[in-house]
Amino acid sequence: MTIASRKERQKEELRSRILQAAKELFIERGFEDTSIRNIAERIEYSPTTIYLYFKDKDDIFRALHLEGFILLNQYFRALEHVQDPFERLKAVCKTYINFARENGEFYDLMFINRSPINAITKDESKWEEGQRAFGFLVNTVQQCIDKGYFEGMDAEVLSFTLWSMVHGICSLKIRNRCDDVVTEATRIDLDKKAADIIVQILDRMHSKKIQ
């Protein structure tokens, strides 16, 4: 290994340590109470070192936000083998809810916290991973329409509506808005029940050909 490659590897390792520390602190304290100094203390470096890798706190959480979307797209990639687009669409809704349940800290950062989007806006960058995830949903819906499902509907509008439905379920659950408003019987396996209802709604939308 050359000196240059060794330095590059060390640089990447430190960047990974910064992101891991930021993620841990975000989970422990929340975004507002996580600072550059906190992150530096966690990895036993000076705050100045952090700024060699990231512009500010928003930039750090943007990088974590990207990791979350890469992971979400891996969940979706596992559904590419489902040939029937309507069955794939139903699987996408369930998979999205499973992702949120299994990766609550990432989900909060990806879809609820404003910070990562602030960083994207500052750089005028495209939200490529987010667009890829939404594109998978839109393409699946369009394939459904091409096969006679959801007659007369716009693929992008329907996709956004479905996304909003599952996002509402996930965000309410992650932010603990369900515990005090639903019965204990309903709270048991709430995510699965909600996913099943969305699937039933999709089935009825197709059978009744809602326009």
Image (cartoon, rainbow, N blue to C red):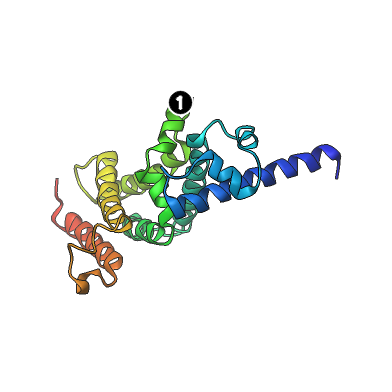
On screen, residue 28 above or below 5:
below
Give the mark count. Answer: 1
88 and 2: which is toward the camera:
2
Looking at the picture, how far across and down is residue 121, in whole percent? 42, 28
**Which residue: 65% across, 36% down?**
49
Examine the image and state in which quarter residue 205 appears. bottom left
Say whether residue 187 is left or right of residue 106: left
**Which residue: 78% across, 40% down?**
7
Looking at the picture, how far across and down is residue 24, in whole percent? 52, 53
Looking at the picture, how far across and down is residue 176, in whole percent? 29, 58
Q: Is residue 175 visible?
A: yes
Q: Pick the quarter of the image with the C terminus.
A: top left
Q: Is residue 72 visible?
A: no
Q: Residues within 10 Å of mark 1 (few under 14, many from 20)?
A: few
- Given the image, on which type of amino acid does mark 1 rest? Lys
Q: Residue furthest bottom?
A: 185
Say whether residue 159 is left or right of residue 152: right
Q: Which residue is mark 1?
A: 122
On screen, residue 65 above or below 189:
above
59 and 67: which is toward the camera:
59
**Which residue: 69% across, 47% down?**
13
**Which residue: 24% across, 69% down?**
187
151 and 202: which is toward the camera:
202
182 and 162: which is toward the camera:
182
Q: Secondary structure at mark 1?
A: helix
Q: Residue furthest right?
A: 2
Looking at the picture, how far across and down is residue 51, in whole percent? 60, 33
On screen, residue 31 above or below 173:
above
Q: Pick the quarter of the image with the N terminus.
A: top right
